[in-house]
Image: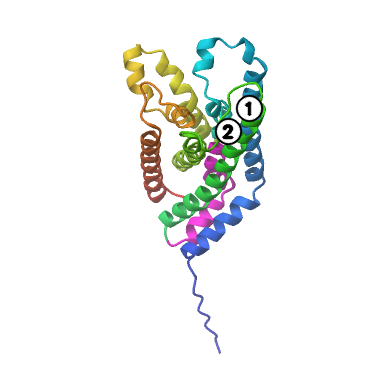
Amino acid sequence: MSITTTTTERRQSFADLLASEWVKIRSVRSTVFTLLITAVLTIGISSLGAFAIAANWNHVPVAQRLTFDPTSRSLSGVLLGQLALGVLGILVFTAEVATGTISATLTAASSRTKVLLAKIVMFAIVAIIVAEIVSFASFFAGQALLSGTTPTASLGGTNVLRAVAGTGLYMAILALFALGIGVIVRHTAGAITIFVGLVLVLPLLVTALPTSLSNDINKFLPFTIGQTMMSVHPQPDTFSAWAGLGLLVIYTIIILAIANWQLTIRDA
């Protein structure tokens, strides 16, 4: 007598994919390490910047005092903190590629698009929470250090809450942009190089162009968008803070759409 056994393979639902991505993010050592670096760089450098200006306030030229923005100064650590969070976005995908587990993930899922969407949703939640925490922590630490010697800001001031909360959103959206680069490139070092080049090196190259040309290009760069968001004052030759953030969202949607296309046509 023969016994026939029928095995039905169950494809993962979207809820399963979300749960899987959460387990991956919280259980990987590099996640905790990268988030700690994000917090230390953002809050630490912001605090150092505030301490430096407070210690030398009496020697600051009058013209610089008149344009001093305590909110922007207390968020200066975002310059490096955004890179650390972006690296985590890249690792969300490239770490799976490096270990070979991406093949099992794509085989078990009913749709590669759903796999990417689950990664985007879960990482977006983590990135927004972390970015907002470090942004507000940097602001309060910076204001505490500035207090007593220099002008300070409060969240009730004009555009201050927009700048602090908006800076957190800027960091999170930029990290999702980095995730898209990671999916397209599939190599950690290569993706980090491209990300850093776009965020920090490209603005330096643009400044070498004639002023009329560099002003037109500069306002479209993520770095400029971040600087505008961090400031409570309108910046010359830039988009408004929310218009700039909207432009960054468009960049991110485009890069994630390309990433999804690449994921669906390439071998695991």
Q: Is residue 95 magenta?
A: yes
Residue 137 drawn above or below residue 70: below
Q: Classify residue 261 as left or right of residue 126.
A: left
* Callout in the foreground (2, 1): 1
Question: Does dot 1 land on a helix, a strand or a loop?
Answer: helix
Question: How many other residues sit within 10 Å of disc 2, few (<14), some (14-19) or many (≥20)?
Answer: many
Q: Classify residue 19 as left or right of residue 212.
A: right
Q: Sequence order check: which comes first, mark 2 or mark 1?
A: 1
* Distance between the alpha carbons at the discs numbered 2 and 1: 9 Å
From the image, tell me which residue sits under label 1.
Answer: 45
Give the image's coloring scheme: rainbow
User: Residue at the location (46% across, 43% down)?
Assistant: 183
Magenta segment's dominant SS is helix
Give, as a single range, the part of the protein colored magenta: 85-110
Residue 85 drawn above or below residue 9: above
**Residue 1, labelled with which disc?**
none
User: Where on the picture, by quarter, is residue 241?
Assistant: top left
Residue 118 visible in this rendered orientation of the protein: yes
From the image, tell me which residue sits under label 2.
Answer: 81
Residues at discs 2 and 1 in contact (Cβ within 8 Å): yes
Quadrant in which the N terminus is drawn: bottom right
Label 2 is placed on what type of residue? Gly
